[in-house]
Image (cartoon, rainbow, N blue to C red):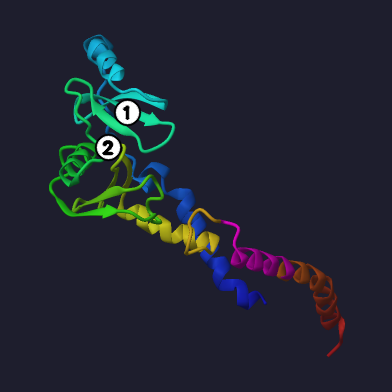
Amino acid sequence: LALLIGLPILGWFVSGLFIAFVPEDAIHGHSAHRDPPVVAGTIAAPLAALLARQPGDYSRIELRTMLGRPVVQLTPTEGSPRVIDIRSGRVLTPVGRDMAIALAREALGPGAGAPVDVRRITAPLRAFPGPLPAWRVDFADADGSQVYVAADLGRVMATRTRLFRVFDVMWSIHILNFADPRGINTPWLWGLAALATVVAATGFIMLPGRLRLRRRRRTVPD
């Protein structure tokens, strides 16, 4: 039994060491990008006028910036959110390909360069279980960055690097789940944990008998 579970336990140890020692910020590809602040006095009047033209019930009203310009995100109680330019009143979402690229490059900083691939995502991915639809913008930088932009929010939701993709594999090995990285309660994990417990218990049960047998062999004359 010990030989049977030896390989998965080795996988536990190796993946656990990787998860423990690699910094979390490096794994998840957090960017140093921050939205510039909004000066309330400069947008108070146009914001009030804009909200007056947007009747309805909203569960959330958020003031922020988008590519350097002040915007308001209106999340209705039903339906998709809208992001509106406060000064012009133009609805900016859902964002298109070009704006998604601009948001991704802004998030990575001036060294991002041109993207090598841009894809529209409509189904959940292991690397991005966030709001859909979304855009994935790939860059050929040193980290192999992939930036995910939520189309209805006009916002970068995640930045994934090559190191994150290694982490994803290690995490899957650690929880024995290659389908859903969020699910740790799997039959494979239960079964292997139960089997490891049986092996440990039988080892402790057999240990006294093995020690007595060794003592007998040492006391038997030639």
Q: What is the number of the mark on residue 20?
A: none
Residue that appears at 56% across and 69% down: 8
The answer to which image quadrant residue 186 occupies is bottom right
Residue that appears at 16% across and 23% down: 88
Residue where numbered disc 2 is placed: 154
Q: Please indicate, yes or no, whether residue 185 appears anywhere in the rendered image.
A: yes
> How far across and down, in percent of the image, does residue 57 sit?
41, 25
| Real-space Cα separation, disc 2 to disc 1, in angstroms | 9 Å
Residue that appears at 54% across and 67% down: 10
Vertical placement of residue 112 versus 39, above or below: below
> Judging from the image, what secondary structure is the residue with disc 2 in?
loop
The answer to whether the residues at label 2 and label 1 have Cβ atoms under 8 Å apart is yes
> Judging from the image, what secondary structure is the residue with disc 1 in?
strand
Residue where numbered disc 1 is placed: 73
Frontmost residue, 186 versus 22: 186
Q: Magenta stretch: dominant SS?
A: helix
For marks 2 and 1, the one nearer the N-term is: 1
